[in-house]
Image (cartoon, coloured by chain):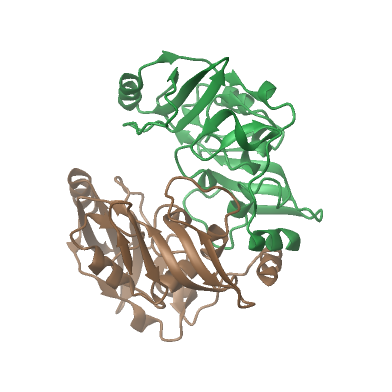
Chain colours: A brown, B green
Amino acid sequence: MELHTADQYLVAEAGVDLLAVLEALKGTGLYPPFPPVELPGGVGGLVARGGFAQNFFFPAEVLGLTFRTPKGRVVRAGGVVVKNVQGYDLVRPFVGSFGLLGEALEVVFRLRPGQVSLFLRRPFSGEFPALSPSPRFLFALKEGEAWWLYAYHFGPEKEVARFHETFGGEEVGPLDLRPLFPRGMGVGEGPLKDLRFAWRDGGKTPEAPALFQRLAASL
Amino acid sequence: MELHTADQYLVAEAGVDLLAVLEALKGTGLYPPFPPVELPGGVGGLVARGGFAQNFFFPAEVLGLTFRTPKGRVVRAGGVVVKNVQGYDLVRPFVGSFGLLGEALEVVFRLRPGQVSLFLRRPFSGEFPALSPSPRFLFALKEGEAWWLYAYHFGPEKEVARFHETFGGEEVGPLDLRPLFPRGMGVGEGPLKDLRFAWRDGGKTPEAPALFQRLAASL
């Protein structure tokens, strides 16, 4: 892992655990684009699935990528420039392509500053609520027979305090959800939901549009 | 043009002028992802070039697209959902692809709210300054022998007032820059610069990576 705090980005091999990234960032005041939750496949798996639990445009937080295409080509896409993409973007189609464009080897994440962070849970009603301030990450997890709504936020102290007040609930620590997905994390009704999908063990990948499949086959 | 103020998006045919979009949005308190500047090719041209003058991740503001591929296929990509991309993203590679993936037919822009907006200019030193608050759009234009720095911002009243104070300069109206580009707007030293490129009449498109060309050829 390579941490560039001044330029606010991080380079990680695809196999690096999500919680290992958070551990490496402790004390820097910088945060990656995922919550303190371990999921299958480390950062490579996360990017292939298009992120987890985010309440923002995740692909913009992936500044660069090295990946191996299905035909075995190794491609470097994007870079470490934060603000602007110069065009001919191969990073964004890779993100959320569920392996169709190949396998990530290395990922460059944008890091964002925050004074504090807070991870909370409260009982889940079955619907994701509109919250203000809107936490950066929101997901629902079934534990035993009960569903819980988890929210993770970082930012300025005052904003995080307002999040605490609005959301209520209880504070929680990092979660390891890998045991829920021994056969891999796919889409389908299961014990985990975020704003995009329901996730289940051995679940499917979403169906790709024909043109995207053609694109994948060309790489 | 179709304006959806409640859901904060706009659908425009590719040929629609940028200033016509701004005109249609007058009084709604909503703003598109470009400044009050007319450029060649309307919204389709803008998207093909990857936007203009923005100080943020432009591709995320293009929610959906209909385009005709070089082989003549008509493709609908993305949609009108603001927060999350479900994966298999064909919108983002199109944005900034300078026509390589085909021709836009219709564009769906995300709109963002602002209480007020302000368009200012002041003499340009040759370097883009770091400003706080950072205006959403920043570009430099040569007029006669002098270079001017233009900045356009919208947002909460107080923030725009602080922008006014920090930036100084004089207020300006919408600009029509199409006469600068009778042979088309391309990349190269010329009378216009933004944070990504210098732009000139009849300028070139940036060179596409080999893999991107392969991808384009597949569509």
Would residue A147 be seen by someone viewing this image from the given angle? no
Note whether B8 is above or below B70 in the view shown.
above
What residue is drawn where x is 73% and y is 26%?
Answer: B182
Left or right, A13 with reference to B88: left
Residue A46 seen anywhere in this rendered image of the structure: yes
Q: Quadrant of residue A10?
A: bottom left
Residue A156: image location, x then y, percent: 22, 46
Front one among A39 and B135: B135
Q: Position of residue B9 (x, y in %)?
A: 55, 39
| Above/below status of A151 relative to B114 | below
Q: Could you say which is closer to the camera, residue A124 or residue A23?
A: A23
Left or right: A1, with B9 as reference point: left
Could you tell whether A17 is left or right of B146 in the image?
left
Location of the N terminus of chain B by quadrant is: top right
Check the image and name the residue furthest to the bottom.
A182
Where residue B50 sits, quadrant-wise, is top right
Residue A12 vs A158, above or below: the answer is below
Q: Quadrant of the C terminus of chain B?
A: bottom right
What residue lies at 70% left-to-right and 52% top-to-bottom?
B101
- Residue A174 position in % (x across, y down): 24, 70
Name the spot of residue A27 as percent of width and height, x first. 18, 59
Report the number of numbered marks: 0
Residue at point 55% right, 38% down? B197
Q: Residue furthest right?
A: B72
